[in-house]
Structure formats: structure tokens, C-alpha cells
Image: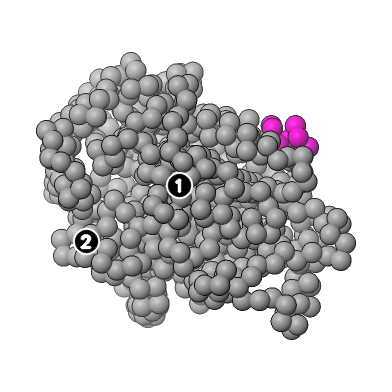
Amino acid sequence: MTVGRFFRNTTIALALLAPTGLLAEDSTFLIEAPNPTAIERPNIVLVLADDLGFTDLASYGSEISTPTIDALAQQGVSFTNYHTAANCAPARAMLLTGVDAHLAGVPNIPEMLAPEQKRHAHYQGVLGSNVVTVATLLEGAGYHTYMAGKWHLGAGPGKLPSQRGFERTVALADSGADNWEQRPYIPLYDKANWYADGEEYQLPEDFYSSRFLVDKTIEFIDSNIEDGQPFFAYLPFQAVHIPVQAPQEFIDRYMGAYDGGWDELREQRRARAMELGIIPADSDIGRMSTTADWSALDADQRRYQAKRMAVYAAMVEAMDYHLGRLVDYIKARGEYDNTIIIFTSDNGAEASGPQDHDSFAGRRGPAALGYHTDYERLGLKGSYNTISPSFASAAVSPLAYYKFYAGEGGMRVPLIVAGASLPVQGELSHAFSFVTDITPTVLSFAGVVPPDARYGGRSVEPMIGRDLGPLLRQEAQRVYGPEDSVGYELAGHAVLFQGDYKIVFHRTPLSDGQWHLYNIVRDPGETEDLSSTEPARLQRMLSAYERYTRDNKVLPVPPGFDNYKQLVINVLYTRLRTPVLVTLLTILILLPFVVAYRRKRQDA
């Protein structure tokens, strides 16, 4: 049976059952036709990249080789106007529950929450017990549920993925970690905290993150492949979160590819994205104030910066390569035609790396943790590599801003929904969609009814996301109407989407601290502020944002709040003041001021 017919049968069954009272508030039902064997429920694989920029895939305009993901794009629908949170834990909370991050307990990553905020139960930075994960609902409907990768939604009692609906797991509890060995990447953690099926786990000696996570996913699927039950596999990669690392054979392919610099790359990607139809043909492009002058660098600096980006590209390709092994396995076991694969990213590109690798911050920070930044070994075991705001702006081209900010570059990322059984193949959708839509869409594929106000005998937050099925079947051009609003807030940065428009507020120093209005369909680069020409629309959307903050219990940030400063304060509160720690904290304290100073000099 095709997915399209399955959707229609599910809708009919729901309509028949609803009046009878058989859909209890505290239960989830799999709706089946009278002959259950007539419907083969699809396997579902949810793949999440980490910090992947909008044009980091070849099918979205990149020069990076991503043949596996590009092939998926040809067997489904690629979304060009999909938005997520601007950093990882809130995105993962919404992705897996369909509930706004504030109500789900994850308004920001826990490492950056202020004490004034953490006095409130819904501001703990870990997934609350008032939400139900897609894995719990699918497991209750007879699916095998697996996870291999980064979790970052809590590690305390009842918080690990093995206690949130996943049958088999190997999970990184932290915000990130090394990709070659079991070691932390920031001084906040004593070690890299990995867990397998709820127990502390020691990584193998031959560990490389993308290879290992695919190996475990294949292992989990293969353990039950013969029993006839469908599976849901959640594969949240570490790629391309810092430290940016990759095998040498992948790095070699990109040596010399970025010798032209970040401005050239940003323009090349914009042109390619227009050619592919990812963005409008007349899309304008701006330049971030945090982007450095490539021509002002000397030859050695350019050489080093180009390799930083080469390692980044290599890490993306390595992820794609290992994902290809999973696809090949599913095909070899005869399950591919009955498998839906969803690929996306948790947020836009990470821009925390220093502009100058040879600066105090660039050298002393990694060295204090035992890492090197040598050119020849960059990206290999023991190396600490990042990309700076300059190349991050190219990774999100032609968008503005990047991770941690509510600009399109921080929130707009690729989304591909693929499957041999989908009625539409190789198409683009320009409809607005949001990260809370993923869980309702997955449940729709599985024929599972989301809970309303109760589940398992307790009150739960209802899902706000929308099923993207009508877009996948080309039965509708939108799932959000022109007056429907979707709000979002992170550490004082705020945004509201409505129809083709968006209002956005960025806190200083990278912005003027004012609300701006953009038509993000016509102008995805946010180059034309419409707030003065459409003041009535701006006011209506501001009122809608105020409703959003009330409905979702959004708390204000404390005076003088800054993500990096708060991270420093939180570390000081929980750890001893060792010389290594003092060095790293000094770097984190100074970094925002250095960025602001450089911006002022460029604007002068």
C-alpha cells in the first residue's frame, strides 16, 4: 500500500472512531484497517546533523560532495523555508515532542541559563516530564525505537533517552565532545559523558563519531530486523559541531578549495542556490559585520583559514559517506522501499571559533585542554579545529547571522523528507515549516494519534506542530495560513513568523536592539527592512509575539545577560578555580568584547 493511501485510510478510521469515544485522552492508538496485514507501516529514520549551515549540502548549493543526501533529495521533498531553533537543546526538545521549547523545559541549553531563570521549573534546560517524545508514542504503537548520537536533553533520573521511549541507545549527554576519543571539548565537563541503554559507556579505541554512530544504528536495527515490526531510528550526528574533525582522506579532497576566501564562497553558494531554485532568482545578499577582510590576511593566515574550512567540508562529507552505509544496509535487508528518511539540522552554522587562530584565544584555549592547533594535523586526533564567523557566514549563504541568533542563518536549515513510496519525488517545497512539525509528521506516517491533554495518566502539553503530509503529497501549498503565527525566543533574541513575513529582534552588540520586519520568502537574506513601510503589519506581529510570550511562559533575560558570560559564571559556580580553568574562562569572558570592538572598528 502506498503512503498516500495509508494517510487516507488513517484519516477515515479516525473520523469513524472519534464519535464513539474510543480515542481515550490518556492513550495512543495505532489506527489499522480491518485487515492489519494489508498495511505495512513504514520504518522511519530521523537523521539530525549538528550545526549544519543552510547551503552546506550540494543539493542546497554547496561545493561539498554529499551524494547520499542528494540522492535522498531526489526521492522526496526538499524544504527551502524550514526553520528550527537557533541552538541545539531547544531544537532537539521541539523536534522530539512537537511542543515549544519553553513549555518543554528547554528554553536554552542548560550550560547558559541564568540562576534567575533556573528558579522556574520550566527553565531547567532538560526535557520535562510534561511532554511525550515521539519515541514513546511509537514504542507504544509497536515500533522498535533506537537512538545513536547526541542527546543533550538531560542525564538525571528519568532524563536519558532510554527512559524517554528509546528501546536501545548509545547517547552523548553533553553539548558536544571530541570526535576521535572520549574526551570533553570544554572545561565544563570532567569527561565526555556517554551512555548505552542508561548505563555509563566507554567508547572503543577506534572511535570516529560518524562511523561509530552509523555502526550502532545498523547494529540496533539488525538485532530485530526479522520480527516484522517496523523501526524508528533517531541518528543525531556530532558532525559538524566543534571540535571540527575529519579523517585525512576526506580532508585531502578539499585542500585548495577555499583559497579564495569566505566572501567568494558566500557568493558562489548564493549563485548555486538560485540556480537550483532553493532561493529566489533575485535574492540579495548582505555582509555580516563580523566577517573579516580576507585581503588583509597574509599568505600564512589565508592558508590556515582555508584549511579550517577544508576540515569542516571533510566532516560534512564523512557524515554523508557513513549515512550512505546505513542506506545501503537498509537496501540490502529489503527494507528501503518501506522506509521514510528525514534529514535536517538542529540549527545553523557555529561561529564561535576565533577569527585569528594564532591569537591568545585561538592558541591558549585548546592548549589548556590538551589539544593542538597545528596546521599539518588540523582536524586529526588531538586537534582542536573550528570555523570563525567569517566562514560561518558562507556556510549559511545567503542568509544573515548564524547559530545562537534569530536571523535566518541561525534558524533556516535544510530539511529533506525522502522515501521510495512517497507520491512526490525530487520536488522543492517553499512553504514555511517549523521544527515542531517533525513529530506530528512522523506520527502521521506511522498512523499514530498524538495525545491531547493527557497521556499515561498524567497531564501533558499538547503538540503545536503540524503534519507536513499535505505538502509531501502536494495536496496543499501551505500548512500554515497567512495569519497563523509561530514564535520563538532564545536568550533575549526573538522572532515571530506569520505568512511570508518575519519580525526579529537581536540583542546588542551585533544588532541595534530594535525590531525589524522582513519578507523572508522574497528576501531570505533579510536585506530589506520593511518596518517603516509596513508599520501596521509590524504592530500586528508585535502583538502576536506578546501573546506568544504569555502563552509559552517566556521569561526575560536578566540585565546585562550574555550567553558566554553566563557560561563562565556557571562554570565558576560548579568547579574549582584551577589555572587551566582561569585561562579558559578569561578567554570566554573577553571573546564577546573582542567581537564588539572589531565590529565598531569596521563600522567606523
Magenta span has 329?
yes
Residue in view at x 49 percent, y 71 percent: 461
Amino acid at the residue labelled 2: Pro
> Relative to the observer, which residue lies in front, 198 or 370?
198
Rendered position, 32 above or below 71: below
Looking at the rendered structure, the secondary structure element under dot 2 is helix
Q: Is residue 150 magenta?
A: no
- List x then y, in percent, for residue 542: 35, 76
Q: Is residue 223 above or below residue 166?
A: above
At horizontal 16% and vertical 32% (from top left) the residue drawn is 580
Q: Quadrant of the N terminus?
A: bottom right
In the picture as drawn, the residue positioned furthest to the top comes out as 376
At 13% from the left edge and 35% from the top edge, which residue is drawn? 578
- The disc placed on residue 376 is none
64 relative to 114, above or below: above
In the rendered structure, which disc, 2 or 1, sits on the residue that comes first in sequence?
2
Numbered circle sitting on residue 151: 1
Above or below: residue 370 compared with residue 6: above
| Residue 311 visible at all | no
Q: Residue at x 29, y 51 (%)?
A: 111
Q: Hey, what amino acid is under mark 1?
A: Trp
Judged left or right of residue 495, residue 477 is: right
Name the residue that disc number 2 marks. 115
Query: Toward which corner of the image does residue 246 lie, by quadrant?
Result: top left
State the image coordinates of residue 406 (x, y, percent, origin top left): 36, 58
The answer to whether residue 589 is visible is yes
Give, as a single range, the part of the protein colored magenta.
Answer: 328-335
SS at mark 1 in the image: loop
Q: From the viewer's side, name the closer residue of 96 and 513.
A: 96
Which residue is at the front of the view, 203 or 580? Answer: 203
Residue 164 x/y as whole percent: 52, 55
Figure colour scheme: one colour
